[in-house]
Amino acid sequence: MVHRAHAAWTNGHITGVLLMDIKAAFPSVAKGRLVNFMNVRQMDGDLIRCTESVLSERMVEMVIEGNAMERHPVEAGVPQG
């Protein structure tokens, strides 16, 4: 990112960056809205795919004293592990 910004500055371009606090954003984000917003803003396709992947098909499994509980789908919270 820094290299791309310096290259842009060298060519007289203005640069910007979007920094997301995922710990605060992902517990309640609506995946479809976020991905749509990123597409409308024409953000980098790799970043969109990465964000969509992080928010898709997530499961949670609790293990208490070595005993694994049944896995359940989860759509909120910061990815763990």
Image (cartoon, rainbow, N blue to C red):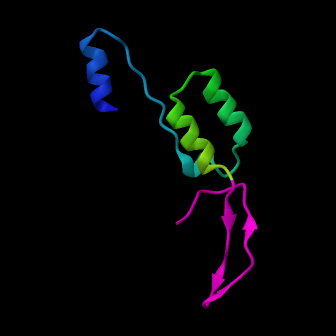
Asked if residue 45 lies in the magenta stretch, the reply is no
Image location of residue 14, percent across then percent down? 37, 14
Residue at 29% x, 8% y is 12
Q: Position of residue 49 (x, y in %)?
A: 57, 39
Q: Quadrant of residue 63?
A: bottom right
Up-down relation of residue 47 to residue 16 (above or below): below
Q: Residue 76 appears in which quarter of the rendering?
A: bottom right
Q: Is residue 37 left or right of residue 10?
A: right
Look at 67% across and 35% down and name the residue there: 34
From what the image shows, is residue 16 above or below residue 20? Answer: above
**Residue 25's spot in the image, x, y percent?**
61, 45
Q: Quick check: 64 left or right of 8?
A: right
Residue at point 52%, 40% (across, down): 20
Residue that lies at the very extreme toward the top in this rendered image: 12
Residue pictured at 73% horizontal, 42% vertical: 30
Please identify the quadrant where the N terminus is shown: top left
Q: Is residue 68 on the magenta stretch?
A: yes
Rendered position, 77 above or below 9: below
Q: Is residue 73 above or below residue 16?
A: below
The residue stretch that appears in magenta: 57-81
Task: Tell me how many marks there are.
Answer: 0
Magenta: predominant secondary structure element?
loop
